[in-house]
Amino acid sequence: MTALTERQQLAYANAQAADGRVNLEFETDEGMTLNMGPQHPATHGTLRIVLKLDGEQVISCEPIMGYMHRGYEKLVEVRTYPQVTTLVNRIDWLGSFANEVPFILAAEKLMDIEAPPRAQWIRTILFELSRISNISLFVGDMALHIGAISAAFYAFRDREYVLNQIEAATGGRFHPNFDRIGGLKDDLPKGWIADTKATMNKIRDFCDEMETLVEGNEIFQTRTRGIGVIPADVALAYGMSGANLRASGVDWDLRRDEPVGLAWNECDWNVITHPDGDSFARFWVRLQEIRESTRIVDQLLDGLPAGPIMAKVPRIIKVPEGEAWVATENPLGEMGYYVVSKGGLGPFRVKIRTASFNNIAVIPWVTRGVYVPDVVTILASLYFILGDIDR
Amino acid sequence: MSASLFGIELSYWQVTSLRSLGILAAVLLPAGTFVYLFLFKMVSFMQSRLGPMEAGPFGSMQLLAEVGKFLQKEDIVPERADAKLFKLAPYLVVSTVLLVYLAVPFGPEMTFVSNFDGGIFYVLAVSSISALGVLLAGWSSANKYSLIGGLRAAGQLIAYELPMVLAVIGVVIQAGTLNMQGIVMAQASGSIFGFDGFGNPFFLTQIIAFVIFMIAVQAELGQTPFDMPIAESELVTGYITEYSGLRFLLFFIGEFASAGAFAAVAATLFLGGWAVPAAWADLDSAIFNLLGPLIMLTKMLILGGLIFFIRFTFPRFREDQLQKLAWTVLIPISLANILVTTILKVAF
């Protein structure tokens, strides 16, 4: 438990003041109801947010989701284990490879097999690449929501380099479907390592560019500093995870704290935290995490072990009876699969824990008393993917 | 009343129709140029893409294609909307721009109202009418986003009309006249500390007023960082959310034509308008009726480029931050500028 900073204590006081106001306003039933979404540019997807406004000030706010519910947990039950990765790719569609990994790891845990080291290292590299492609889009998206259009285009441009590398290795830009129980589908193509290193340099340049263009901009700072402060204990109470939690000053990263057999422990990197817990902190933490990811990828590429990429796995995969829970630190936060097997070809029941679902639960808490533009800032800084909320 | 153009005597109606055509050209030409040059091309290059390339060479006919598209679209008036006001609003916005151009001189005789003594006063007065159109659009659309956008626009206008007027007062004091033609002449034949090689363009001596004026123009036009009335990511598109087809096109033209109009006003006030420094050429010669508009257009493009460069670089302020900037920073500075200008004017 981290101590509350001054800014976080201030947010507490503000929230309590807003609480008093909320009760008053509900009794008088004044104000205007504004329906943000399900079709709205700021919710990038079909999240609906019902705002009760007094002028432009938010009295209360209620996120309503489920407009894009696709029933993955049910769909998974009628598929075999190898078929599931195709589906779960689409949960967080911007970091798709990262969605496959925890499920495959859970299945491997049940079958008691372990992928060979080379496969695990490549998994980690691709995991980090999908993190970079996911978060670099966030950087542009956040700037776009605050009104700077050009940064979004730079983000799309530089994310393309990473997608090219993912495509070169896996054949799929968005939905690789590359992870297999016991290893990977293919080995890396020729020349991929050098190309990826060059790409990592480009991404570091992109981070520099964004630091000067967006983060260093005074208007961006006035719009984000002190806006949407989430104190550490509130963040923990709402079950937030990932960069949102680290931006509130909680030093918690599953990559370091619960290494699940991937290669994060093999290299030297830092968990980034920020004490403020405001929108700026969330932006800053994510931007720094891209840098850390490029460091991880570089080091893993240098020390990539030789060997097979597939363990000995039976042709027809039957998972023995049992239950397993594996969670990893995905781009959006903690993502986990609780797999229940009855010994059949497919899972009996799968519970998917996605990060965005818990991350947006804090919206009513954090938007009390702010203005409409700040709601957009907060939504952008919390960074959710609709598929990750509704799944 | 009769006038002569290149030696040909013209009767009153001929002069009037020529001037009306001139005004239309003055409104539509810069608007089209701004859209193509800045919105399509400059911004695309800023954002590492090519912009329109299909319609005509380098997409130069894209504008016509866009206009054609908007003309074909269904004309929708929302059911709950106040139909009369809803239809009136875009025309109000566009006509404001036409009114602004009336007082801007484009050459020694290239003005609609020649020798208009209250010129700049009139320009500042009519330029605020467009806010009325915006407010009407916001109110009559029967849409909450539109309403918030319209109210934001009104608040923004009140806040930024003042620094704009105060910035202009510095220029007026230095030129000693409200007449736009007089301001142009004062710059062309002026001198800085006795050196009259390039006249006295006021953006040198009134640099503070120039900066404040350009900031106020940015806010008045509703361009980023002051685009809260539109604010795509918050209010969908603010007061134009419900508009489609021709009326949307009118708002679009209004936006870029008023960018042109304010660029023209700023060019006249600070960059010497249609004239070149008097030391370079005889400004009374008839050739400046032809050269003047071209010189003016060049200066407008420079200022328009500045406006759109800022628009596509910066993020957006919040409404209360904008008000704070106007009332606590810009207005005190422009008042101080007036004071200093007055003292220096008396001293020299």
Image: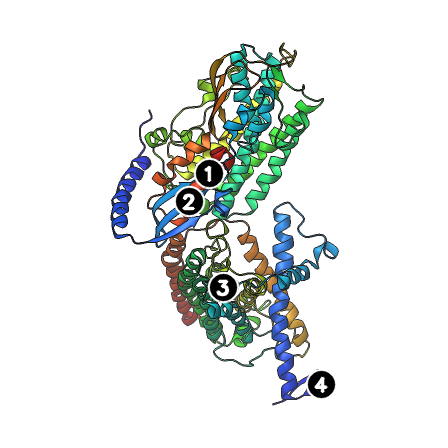
Query: Residues under labels 2 and 4: Cα distance?
Result: 69 Å
Q: Nearer the viewer, residue A108 or B34?
A: A108
Q: Is residue A362 above or below residue B186?
A: above
For the point 50% across and 47% down, the residue is A39
Which chain contains the residue that carries disc 2?
Answer: A
The spot of residue A150 in percent (x, y) is 56, 46
Q: Are marks 2 and 4 in contact (CB under 8 Å)?
A: no
Colouring of the image: rainbow
Residue at the extreme right:
B57
Mark 1, residue position: A66
Q: Which mark is residue A49?
A: 2
Q: Regarding mark 1 in the picture, which secondary structure is present there?
A: loop
Between the C-alphas of marks 2 and 3, the distance is 52 Å
Please report the residue visible at 55 percent of the width from the left and 39 percent of the height from the top: A209
Contact, mark 4 vs mark 1 (Cβ under 8 Å): no
Mark 2: secondary structure:
strand
- Which kind of residue does numbered mark 4 sit on? Gly
Dot label at residue B205: 3
Residues beneath discs 2 and 3 located on the same chain: no
* Alpha carbon distance from label 3 to label 1: 61 Å
The secondary structure type at the circle numbered 4 is loop
Q: CA distance from mark 4 to mark 1?
A: 76 Å
Query: Quick one: which residue is furthest to the bottom in this view?
Result: B1
Which one is in front in this view, the residue at disc 2 or the one at disc 3?
Answer: 2
Which residue occupies 71% across, 82% down? B6
**Residue depth check, mark 2 versus mark 1: number of the one nearer the observer:** 1
- Asked whether the beta carbons under mark 2 and mark 3 sit within 8 Å of each other, the answer is no
CA distance separating discs 2 and 1: 12 Å
